Amino acid sequence: MSSSQNLGGATRCGRVVGPTLDKIIKNAAWRKHTFLVSACKSVLDKLESLSDSPDPSSPLFGLSTSDSDAVLETLLLSLDTAYTKVVEPALDCSFNLFSLSLLRGEVCSSSPDSLLYKLIHAICKVYSLGEESVELAVLRVLLAAVRSPLIMIRGDCLLHLVRTCYNVYLGGFNGTNQICAKSVLAQIMIIVFTRSEANSMDVSSFKTVNVNDLLAITDKNVNEGNSVHICQGFINDVVTAGEAAPPPDFRLVIEPGENPEDGGTSKIREDGFLLFKNLCKLSMKFSSQENTDDQILVRGKTLSLELLKVIVDNGGPIWRSDERQLTPKICRFLNAIKQYLCLSLLKNSALSVMSIFQLQCAIFTSLLRKYRSGMKSEVGIFFPMLVLRVLENVLQPSFLQKMTVLSLLDNICQDPYLIIDIFVNFDCDVESPNIFERIVNGLLKTALGPPPGSSTTLTAVQDITFRHESVKCLVSIIKAMGTWMDQQFSVGESLLPKSVENEALGDNYSNPNEEDGTTADHDFHPDLSSESSEAATLEQRRAYKIELQKGVALFNRKPSKGIEFLISSKKVGSSPDEVVSFLRDTTSLNPTMIGDYLGEREEFPMKVMHAYVDSFDFKEMNFGEAIRFFLRGFRLPGEAQKIDRIMEKFAERFCKCNPNSFSSADTAYVLAYSVIMLNTDAHNIMVKEKMTKADFIKNNRGIDDGKDLPEEYLGALYDQVVKNEIKMSSDSSAPESRQSNGLNKLLGLDGILNLVYWTQTEEKAVGANGLLIKHIQEKFRSKSGKSESAYHVVTDVAILRFMVDVSWGPMLAAFSVTLDQNDDRLAAVECLRGFRYAVHVTAVMGMQTQRDAFVTSMAKFTNLHCAGDMKQKNVDAVKAIISIAIEDGNHLQDAWEHILTCLSRIEHLQLLGEGAPSDASYFASSETEEKKALGFPNLKKKGALQNPVMMAVVRGGSYDSSAIGPNVSALVRQDQINNFIANLNLLDQIGSFQLSNVYAHSQRLKTEAIVAFVKALCKVSMSELQSPTDPRVFSLTKLVEIAHYNMNRIRLVWSRIWSILSDFFVSVGLSENLSVAIFVMDSLRQLSMKFLEREELANYNFQNEFLRPFVIVMQKSSSAEIRELIVRCISQMVLSRVSNVKSGWKSVFKVFTTAAADERKNIVVLAFETMEKIVREYFSYITETEATTFTDCVRCLITFTNSKFTNDVSLNAIAFLRFCALKLADGGLVWNEKSRSSSPSTPVTDDCAPNIQNFMEVDENISYWVPLLTGLSKLTSDSRLAIRKSSLEVLFNILKDHGHLFSQTFWIGVFSSVIYPIFNSLWGEKDLLSKDKDEHSSLPSTYGPHSNGVSWDSETSAMAAQSLVDLFVSFFTVIRSQLSSVVSLLAGLIRSPAQGPTVAGIGALLRLADELGGRFSEDEWMEIFLAVKEAASLILSSFMKILRIIDDVQDEETLSDQDFSNEDNVDEDSLQTMSYVVSRTKSHITVQLQVIQVVTDLYRVHQQSLLASHVAVILEILSSITSHAHQLNSDLILQKKVRRACSILELSEPPMLHFENDTHQNYLEVLQDILTDNPGVSVELSIESQLITVCVKILKMYLKCTVFEGAELEETKQPKNWILPMGAAAKEEAAARSPLVVAVLKALRGLKGDSFKRYAPTFFQLLVELVRSEHINSQVPQVLSTVFHTCMGPMMGE
């Protein structure tokens, strides 16, 4: 034989087999193994002569089939020897052949004669030799065989191989071998099922088993030192050895399977399916009743479950495929899980072995992660059984079991998609349990621990562990929700809720789902139920489920109310049949309540009960089975009448289904009652004496219409009931109790915790009871025939809203209670993480209530309001709040207020700790040194001063208290101070940089966020400043900072920010604390200077917005210091940034306008100095961008003109108005020049005139005259003469100088809104153009001419009237249409009771006529005369009203001579009244005479231009005034009263007689002039007749005073020639009337002969009487003589 290097010849197989055969020959026992040795030598010899020659049918590479068989036979013989020294080389050779892929073939039970089949069986057999090394070798070879890509071990052979490894594990000599066996089995599972996934043997690499993972649950006790290391190396070596590439042209040819359509490759999957099914069956083996504690069996079950776990963990897409995707042969993998694995999990749940439970949980976790989409029903069953059952057991749980469940929950919570899917597919599914809700509530119960007063088996350590782990799970849940939300936002923004802004997501919420390298279930099912994936649909489903559950809960309390609610909400149909379906199909109904409802006697419940019973089919059922079947769905009520109604209907139904059973339904009714009584008697332990069969038969005699039922029948019924109790459906609901915790009041969690109910349970065992398992098996069977319900996958983040609604309350309670009751740092950190994640989710989703609840709770836990009790966890809470502010600032909205309040309190405490003085010292006035420095020299040193601030801070207060109560009297102890100082040291962990970072980060906030941030900061700052004992400016300074930080934002955003800041600055600027207000105004000035540095384009309004606070504070502040500061600030800003001011001019002028009306002279002067400089030097900037600012400038100057402090300011302001007019007339509005083509805004005007609206409807450029002119118009009513005159002069000069620029329309507006109001001011609010005068205008209380106390002097009135006439004359052509109004206005001046306006009106009217008389038309003349007529008429009517007020004054006839002369007898009111009447009478006479003079002058000057109609109006005026004068002088009573008053008051009497004479004299002269100079008009108007009438009237008045006595004598029948002399009064009157009589006589004398003759009869008698009268004036008889001589003589001579 050749050397060992050449053993086996040249073939590749020979080089592997040769050394092994040589070793066998050497190690074999020659006598015992002679045949083996000879066979080995023969094979060796043959191999020496062979070379590699491929044979397609040969199992060994390079050898022929016969040679291959010889080699394999030799190996079989070696293994059959059972001799260790021979077996080991054979096993080693087999390993090499398998690992080097030199063997090929299909090994299955269908070819038992195959040498490969025999070889595998022989290898499996030798493990029983009992040698440790042989066991390892066998495992090595078997793993190599399975690993080989050319060896396909199938069917029973594969199972036998696995069983061999199984046996090695169960009966191994040492722990290392057992661990190796387990590892080999696990690796085999991976190999087999990896090939099944690929459906191919050609899988290049496999995952290598991690031995440590296999020992995570079991077999930790068999680990012998470095066993794990040895086993891991063992597995790695085998797997690595098998990675060698097969020889070329040496492939495994697999014969086609039974189904040609499968392509033959399905054998691989068939083997995988078979192996999986057998492992499931193996895991379901239970020990016999004789040997209940079979540890070997338990280890076997455990190993099977571990291998199943390996399979499930490493399963790929093939396991998730369903019938729609694969052929029936292949789709069995998912069905195998449902059919076998789920059953295994169900049955093993009854065991109390912890390792089995842990494996169940691990397997269920993998199923949940990977296969939930295809196992929705199974998940819905197993989750409550495995997880929730244990989780909700609070009082008596198994520690390890519950820790396993908590670990499971924490594990599944690492997958965000899994949590979302659970909620969507179960909590939103009406037919599924609320898994997510129960998880959260169960975790809350665990986190809160057993209820107070309850007994529990938990130790203190276990309870704390449970609490921490449950909190950790809740944190994982909310973190998963946030991660899923962030991922959805990062994928796409299309489904973003309206109230949620998208944000760049940070690294703090990264998804940890892919860490283990597993593939999520949803990745393989992207199209599942896509048509139902919208959140709106899920919302409807969720709402429907909640409503249905509400109805069920109500039914379980009050059945009738519950049914009514469900019908009204359309969850149940209104027909009895639909209600029956609800009662039978809804599993959560209380059976007792069902029975109570069915027994009701109301109409509808009776119909339901009948329909319920009729829904049963009792056909061919015996009576006992029928009752048992009937009572399975409900529990009979306790009331006998209800039972009677139900059983009566049951009897009827049974007889209807079985018509031949009894003679009548009464029999069935009685027998049913009897059976129920028997069931109670036989199975109630309280019944001591049981009913016998004979008693039962006896009790039922004669019930069948008087006949007896067969005893055999009754006996069988008795036996059936006694042996098998008729069990009614029992109430599964457990009593509930609420938890109450004293600490909850402090935390504000009472309302949240009261939502959580504690379910008491009697369960003590770890495993599920048999009843539960049986119930679940029934569920499996009921679902097996139904199609799988749809599995939903959502991407709409809106679903999180519903999840948060379910979970936020429990989470808040769990985090809050744990954080409050536990000082453990890790627990506190975990709770704070939960708070952060919860705030993130609720904030991004825009759930304001929930977000604010979490933020508020965190803010309370900072304990900054009670710093003396602070701990490390409170500092951690502060850090968490700062993190939230940085990370979720874009979504905090109103919650910013709580966060900023915390930051404010931190800064306050830090300042106290550093010994810095309190801000109160800045605000306090200089009263005492102690108040100036409320801070501490160094608070962190002992012996700090006892002062209010420190005492208040040390004591602390409630979270909501923003200020320290002032009435704190007790001193703080030194130990309290020391404790407080120690706590302040904790705050050193928070640096000022962290606080400042929050404010600096504001520039990164989005639009809505920065607006909310500013709003919240304003609230906090306001709270700080309003503190009565410790006001602070921290937040106020931060407001200025963030304004600087965010100044570069777009204007739209800044406008919103500034709207808030503006209101804040105004509010604080009006503060009673002067220091605060000054600080705010200075801050506002700094910001405004910054803003003014930015250029503003035309037509923008931003500058005006940010300067508006100055305006408002200026207008409303009562502090002169603040107002002066504002004026100085505005002056500084404007003068330093004048070129940048655009829209800000509006606010600037408003400030100066307010300053102009200020009560302080220095403010007015200061403002005007700036205004003067602006107008003189920077006028072009004012209107550079917007011409409306010109209006504001004018209004400001006009306000300065009203200043009461100095006329210089007012006069200069008026001069500047003239300057503005010049600029306006010269086109000085830069803006108009620049934007002539654009459409400028209409200038803003005030409500200075009633016709402003029409006034504004003019050309845009002309319209800017409006505020200027109206302002000057108002100024003419100023109380100061210089101002009035100056304003009048400037106004009319402007109109006269620039009127040529005005259109006719604009002139109309000027007259109505500018000029007329000037003259209206003479009568206060009265309009001189008005024709109606109120009666009260004539009362003594208002007899002063101007209600506002301003009266025009004669000079002013004349100036105004003459200026008006000059203006009208100058622009008569344009403004001719205003003649009537101007004339009316002048007429109004004429009728003014004051002398000055009357004279001015008369002069102006005459001048108007003189200047324009030749240009007036007939109608215009008529307008003039009618206006004068109307003025005269109004004067008369007004005066007559005045006379009425003296009607109640007694006249002298009612007084005695003594009374008449006694002033004391006259009351003061009467004297005042009479004094007023006398004064007005004098004024009235003067005005009337002036009116007559005006009319007379107009006629005489312009008589050539006047028509008869004009003359007629003139005569009417003269006639009316003359008649009025006569009436006034004829009123004797009035004269007596006036005379008496004038006597008492020592006044001159009104010249009534003179008034009468003058009016008649003028009237007479005008008639004579007409008669003489205008014959045509004279004839047309019958002037002669009017003249004669006037003359007769005058003669009668004269005769009345001269012949009075003669008249009396005539009456007494005395001789007529008795003439008595005249009295003194008569003589005085006659003397006064004599010139008038002379004029009359001359007028008669001047008549023509015919005329005299015609009218002589009218006045002849009067002439005769004149002859008889006594005359005081000698001229009267002379003229009378001339009349008789020249006129009467010739007429009589004829």
Image: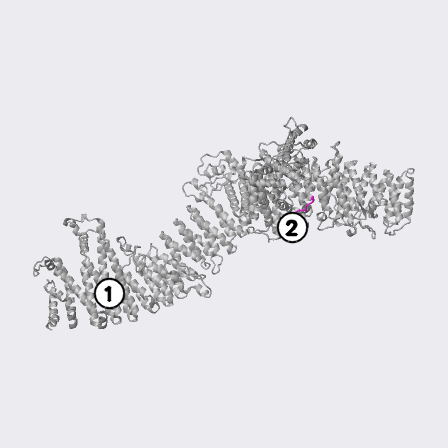
Q: Main secondary structure of the magenta part?
A: loop
Q: Residue furthest top?
A: 689
How far from the left and from the top, in percent, is residue 1688?
Answer: 12, 70
How far from the left and from the top, in percent, is residue 1287?
Answer: 33, 60
Magenta region, residue range: 784-790
Secondary structure, mark 2, is: loop
The label shown at residue 529 is 2
Quarter containing the N terminus: top right
Q: Viewed as shown, does residue 301 lie left or right of 1090?
A: right
Q: Earlier in the sequence, mark 1 or mark 2?
A: 2
Q: Is residue 785 magenta?
A: yes
Callout 1–callout 2 Cβ contact below 8 Å: no
Q: Which residue is mark 1?
A: 1516
Foreground pick, 365 / 6: 365
Image quadrant assignment for residue 877? top right
The amino acid beneath tag 1 is Glu
Secondary structure, mark 1, is: helix
Q: Viewed as shown, does residue 1675 lie left or right of 1203?
A: left
Vertical placement of residue 1011 versus 770, above or below: below
The amino acid beneath tag 2 is Ser
Image quadrant assignment for residue 1406? bottom left
How far from the left and from the top, in percent, is residue 915?
Answer: 49, 40
